[in-house]
């Protein structure tokens, strides 16, 4: 029986466990580097481009004292025809205990978790899930507002192709926030995650009531044709200086990154007092330390 826990999506965590990870995050952000992953070997395998997620997982592992190995998929034996399952078996036999994986296919990390005798952490799979990004977004919101009950969080833009949005909706719901999804029909079907979030088309109306707005990138690598013209998108959904002025005085703006200036946001957002992007990125390291420590050391305690 497989005993080691993986993190494929937020549904793998009970609400109390999310709090447990947040407590660990706070601890790791306020203390010197810990050695709680000393002698634990971690492999990072990213089959898709990444800057923030890859760097922060690497930093998190290093700060916990782990042995960190990066495998570039195109330079690995996968290029010689080895399957990912056989790669996972091979790494497990070498004593690798943690595999952090990003892949364009939905369900890929879950498939690897079936073959790998260790912890798999999903660093983003297709449009399916991105649990550590959702956790760091939730953490940033909690830091800002405390409890999220009664708070309205809007997620705006290309929701359809966003794994961040899917994971965040689960997490926000679990923590009691009201979630509003906003976008044109081509980026947000009217039956998207039914029962979990309200769907709105009018960004201006939502901006007047939201406590937090999460802006998404148009994920052009995931579809062939734009469902509306660039100009139309910008006119209806770009967060710009004029729209910022209509927001509630305490409201904040978040973005998982990478952001595209001139598309989903204009330059004035980067100067806005409520822009929390840097905080999100900063918490990304602590959250990933907490997740790794939670998976590995809880498991160790159980195994003893
Ligand atoms: C996101 C991703 O890869 O899903 N980025 C990230 O991890 N911070 C969002 C995106 O690529 O737009």
Image (cartoon, grey):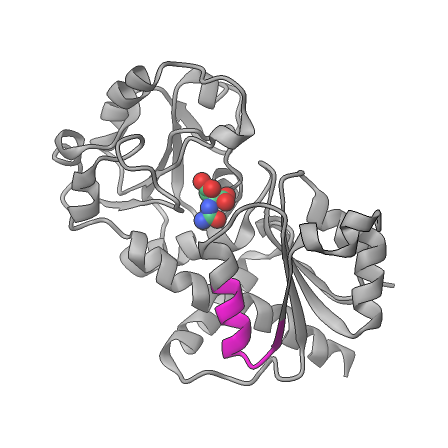
Instruction: Work out whether residue 199 or residue 78 is closer to the camera in this orientation and state it.
Output: 78
Instruction: Work out whether residue 182 or residue 256 is closer to the camera in this orientation and state it.
Output: 256
Asked where in the image residue 245 lies, by quadrant, the reply is top left
82 left or right of 39 in image? right
What is the x, y in percent for residue 53? 49, 56
4 left or right of 44 in image? right
Q: Give the range drawn in magenta.
A: 56-68
Quarter of the image that includes the C terminus: bottom right
Q: Is the magenta stretch mostly helix, strand or loop?
A: helix
Whether residue 20 is visible here, answered yes or no, is: no
Asked where in the image residue 249 lies, by quadrant, the reply is top left
What is the x, y in percent for residue 168? 48, 44
What is the x, y in percent for residue 179? 40, 37
Tally of numbered tags: 0
| Residue at image coords 84%, 61% | 89
| Residue at image coords 41%, 85% | 32
| Residue at image coords 14%, 32% | 246
Magenta-span inclusion, residue 63: yes
């Amino acid at each position: 029986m497989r005993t080691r826990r993986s993190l494929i999506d937020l549904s793998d965590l009970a609400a109390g466990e999310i709090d447990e990870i947040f407590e660990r995050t706070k601890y790791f952000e306020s203390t010197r580097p810990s050695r709680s992953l000393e002698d634990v070997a971690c492999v990072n395998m990213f089959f898709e481009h990444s800057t923030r997620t890859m760097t922060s997982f690497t930093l998190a592992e290093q700060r916990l004292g782990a042995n960190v190995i990066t495998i570039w998929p195109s330079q690995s034996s996968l290029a010689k025809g080895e399957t990912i399952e056989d790669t996972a078996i091979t790494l497990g036999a070498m004593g690798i205990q943690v595999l952090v994986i990003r892949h364009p296919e939905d369900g890929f990390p879950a498939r690897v978790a079936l073959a790998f005798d260790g912890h798999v952490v999903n660093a983003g799979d297709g449009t399916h899930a991105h649990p550590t990004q959702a956790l760091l977004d939730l953490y940033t919101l909690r830091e800002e507002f405390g409890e999220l009950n009664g708070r309205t969080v809007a997620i705006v833009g290309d929701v359809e192709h966003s794994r961040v949005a899917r994971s965040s909706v689960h997490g926000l719901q679990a923590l009691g926030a009201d979630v509003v999804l906003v976008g044109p029909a081509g980026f947000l079907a009217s039956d998207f995650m039914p029962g979990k979030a309200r769907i709105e088309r009018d960004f201006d109306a939502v901006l007047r009531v939201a406590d937090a707005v999460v802006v998404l990138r148009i994920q052009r690598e995931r579809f062939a044709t734009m469902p509306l013209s660039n100009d139309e998108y910008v006119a209806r959904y770009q967060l710009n200086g004029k729209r910022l002025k209509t927001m509630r005085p305490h409201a904040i703006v978040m973005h998982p990154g990478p952001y595209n200036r001139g598309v989903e946001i204009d330059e004035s957002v980067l100067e806005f007092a409520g822009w929390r992007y840097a905080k999100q990125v900063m918490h990304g390291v602590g959250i990933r330390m907490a997740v790794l420590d939670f998976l590995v050391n809880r498991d160790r305690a159980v195994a003893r």
